[in-house]
Image (tube, helix red, strand yellow):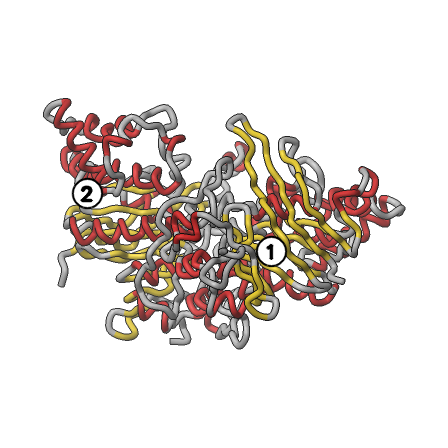
């Protein structure tokens, strides 16, 4: 068993919906957006855990919640980082955590400050955490971090501005800024979806090599099953704030059990001629997370619903070793 | 005679740094009812080529030379009035970002009706009725003609764009990355809808995308573009199973397959050339793994390799006579 880096139990993120003044007076029940609604999983050391789902399913919110980047009032449940409860950490522990857990955002065109040089961007975390002993030390660390992120020779990049870099290079700068803190855990939120296909492979390979070298664990958030297929050890499929299926990535993608995961796998575009592929295209779109459907939240779109599906919500139960799914059919 | 016959099209943009030759000698044909994919990475000229067909280039862009024969008539010789009648009536386009392509302060029904009335002398009321029918055609409720674009979800807005593109029953619809910002399930819904409408109405289609894998569901043929030129064009089966051009092969490998190996393929080293100063010879040669001496000297021609299959690469016969 690999040691556990992150354990999440019954994580819920509920945002209160702003209501009008009169509605407030009349004492009407406050509506909430249940963005994440009871999610549990754990990530081992050096493991890539993929959280897959469509937009609005709560995958990014989950990623932000485990880094404690959300309004604490909205978050409930338990998040343990290296055995310590994140929601009850003391200031010093929190500082340690902020070093050890970092995030890579989706869009390197927006996540980097256009007025700062690469050196400024990458060295900023050192200044915040007061980690560099001297100017020379800081410079050395920045250079090492850039080289780790594949920007070689680092000296050529230090004084450049983001606009001078390609999309792939920008994402490497973002990775270097995360690496400089020597993280144990990275949340990568769609790190390649804004990049051209020919550079995607490089960034993903970089992520894997960093995992191998520094035993970094990843929470890899993506809508693209094919990426989790090549990268992830474990995968969880989310729908409307819940995990509907979870298990070893290979099994989940090759033999999905939940009807939603099955549909998701079937509609994945593949570079193959159309002949002979059968597929179920789900109708409509995921419902609004303010008015959750009764019972199983997938039942209104499910191709094979049972009578009990709109009454009782199925639990995420263990079916085979290491595989879980939430469906009454199973 | 093909429905559309593009011959040696050149288009460029003038920017401060110089002249960008975005499309540099592109030729292809499109038959009635056929669906052609135009694939390539950002900046390869695929969108410029498509906008040229509609004579819709931005003010700093221009078509330098070539012919765009639509039913035998050269679109590039049309005067302003002819262009106005041709655009949308004969060829229409589904843009990438429906939120930016639709007017945010006008009801979608009015926007569709406007497109119809530009080409048909009918009353506003009649056009409104047609707009409603079109919305139903794309599986939206007809009463939503009174809604504004922000009241639709991303997928629904793209359906509105499709309704608008169909408004005048064009012979050719261009889809410029019509599903790029959408989820896979919505993407599948949109492509299924486009395919059924295309078959029903007998339209031809040009689908522009960077995602080779979406072509499988919709296209009969595909053209791979690199640095302003087509490097390979042929039946989709050939491009998926045994592409010839090294760039086409690299591009195909870049897409992980769910049934394929669980590892990332190698990326293509280097970056695409700057289109202000293109490399001599084959434009792909600085990045090509199979580069030969001739590649840096002579530009390969797009030569026939099989039925309706052309490749521009020195690996396959001499481009220009080597002597």
Foreground residue among A301 and B94? B94
Say the numbered circle drawn on residue B207: 1
Say the numbered circle drawn on residue A62: none
Locate the N terminus of chain B and report the quarter of the image it occupies: bottom right
Position of residue A304 relative to residue A17, above or below, is below
Foreground residue among B311 and B166? B311
Foreground residue among A13 and B297? B297
Residue B30 horizontal/vertical position (percent): 68, 60
Say the numbered circle drawn on residue A183: 2
Which marked residue is nearer to the observer: mark 1 or mark 2?
A: 1
| Disc 1 with disc 2 on a shared chain | no
Foreground residue among A114 and A143? A143
Chain label for disc 1: B
When asked about the image quadrant of residue B4, the answer is bottom right
Position of residue A73 relative to residue B249, above or below, is above
Chain label for disc 2: A
**Whether residue B142 is visible:** yes
Label 1 secondary element: strand
Residue furthest out toward the left:
A133
Q: Residue at x 14, y 29 (%)?
A: A131
Q: Residue at x 75, y 57 (%)?
A: B171
Q: Residues within 10 Å of mark 1 (few under 14, many from 20)?
A: many
């Amino acid at each position: 068993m690999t040691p556990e880096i992150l354990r999440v139990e019954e994580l819920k993120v509920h945002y209160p919906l702003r209501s009008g003044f009169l509605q407030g007076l009349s004492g009407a029940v406050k509506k909430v957006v249940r963005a994440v609604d009871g999610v549990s999983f754990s990530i081992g050391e050096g493991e890539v855990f993929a959280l897959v789902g469509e937009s609005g399913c709560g995958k990014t919110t989950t990623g932000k919640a485990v880094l404690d980047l959300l309004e604490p009032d909205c978050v409930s449940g338990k998040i343990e980082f290296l055995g310590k409860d994140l929601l009850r950490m003391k200031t010093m522990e929190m500082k340690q955590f902020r070093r050890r857990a970092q995030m890579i955002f989706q869009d390197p065109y927006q996540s980097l400050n256009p007025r700062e040089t690469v050196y400024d961007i990458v060295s900023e975390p050192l200044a915040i955490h007061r980690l560099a002993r001297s100017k020379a030390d800081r410079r050395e660390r920045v250079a090492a971090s850039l080289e780790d992120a594949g920007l070689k020779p680092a000296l050529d990049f230090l004084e450049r501005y983001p606009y001078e870099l390609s999309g792939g290079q920008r994402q490497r700068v973002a990775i270097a800024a995360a690496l400089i803190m020597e993280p144990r855990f990275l949340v990568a939120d769609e790190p390649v979806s804004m990049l051209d296909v020919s550079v995607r492979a490089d960034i993903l390979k970089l992520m894997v090599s960093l995992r191998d070298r520094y035993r970094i664990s990843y929470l890899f958030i993506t809508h693209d099953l094919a990426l989790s297929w090549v990268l992830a050890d474990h995968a969880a499929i989310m729908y409307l704030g819940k995990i509907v299926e979870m298990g070893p990535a290979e099994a989940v993608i090759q033999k999905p059990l939940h009807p939603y995961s099955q549909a998701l796998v079937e509609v994945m575009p593949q570079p193959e001629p159309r002949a002979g592929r059968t597929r179920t295209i789900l109708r409509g779109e995921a419902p609004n997370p303010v008015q959750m459907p009764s019972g199983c939240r997938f039942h209104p779109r499910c191709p094979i619903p049972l009578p009990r599906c709109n009454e009782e919500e199925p639990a995420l139960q263990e079916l085979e070793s290491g595989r879980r799914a939430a469906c009454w059919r199973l | 005679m093909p429905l559309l016959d593009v011959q040696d099209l050149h288009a460029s943009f003038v920017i401060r740094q110089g002249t960008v030759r975005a499309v540099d000698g592109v030729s292809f044909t499109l038959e009635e009812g056929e669906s052609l994919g135009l694939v390539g990475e950002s900046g390869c000229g695929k969108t410029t080529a498509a906008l040229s067909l509609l004579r819709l280039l931005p003010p700093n862009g221009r078509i330098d030379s070539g012919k765009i024969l639509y039913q035998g008539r050269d679109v590039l010789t049309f005067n302003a009035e002819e262009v106005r009648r041709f655009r949308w009536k004969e060829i229409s386009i589904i843009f990438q970002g429906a939120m930016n392509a639709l007017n945010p302060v006008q009801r979608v029904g009015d926007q569709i009706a406007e497109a119809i009335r530009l080409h048909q002398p009918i009353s506003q009321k009649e056009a409104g009725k047609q707009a409603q029918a079109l919305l139903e055609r794309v599986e939206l409720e007809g009463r939503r003609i009174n809604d504004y674009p922000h009241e639709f979800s991303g997928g629904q807005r793209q359906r509105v764009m499709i309704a608008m593109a169909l408004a005048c029953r064009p012979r050719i619809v261009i889809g410029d990355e019509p599903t790029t910002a959408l989820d896979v399930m919505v993407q599948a819904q949109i492509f299924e809808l486009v395919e059924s409408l295309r078959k029903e109405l007998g339209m031809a289609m040009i689908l522009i995308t960077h995602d080779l894998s979406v072509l499988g569901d919709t296209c009969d043929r595909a053209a791979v573009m690199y640095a302003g030129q087509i490097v390979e064009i042929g039946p989709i089966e050939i491009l998926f199973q045994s592409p010839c051009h090294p760039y086409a092969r690299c591009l195909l490998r870049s897409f992980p397959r769910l049934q394929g190996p669980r590892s990332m393929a190698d990326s293509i080293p280097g970056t695409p050339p700057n289109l202000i100063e293109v490399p001599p010879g084959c434009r792909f040669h600085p990045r090509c793994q199979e580069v030969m001496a001739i590649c840096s000297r002579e530009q390969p021609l797009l030569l026939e390799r099989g039925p309706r299959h052309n490749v521009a690469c020195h690996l396959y016969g001499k481009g220009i006579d080597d002597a």
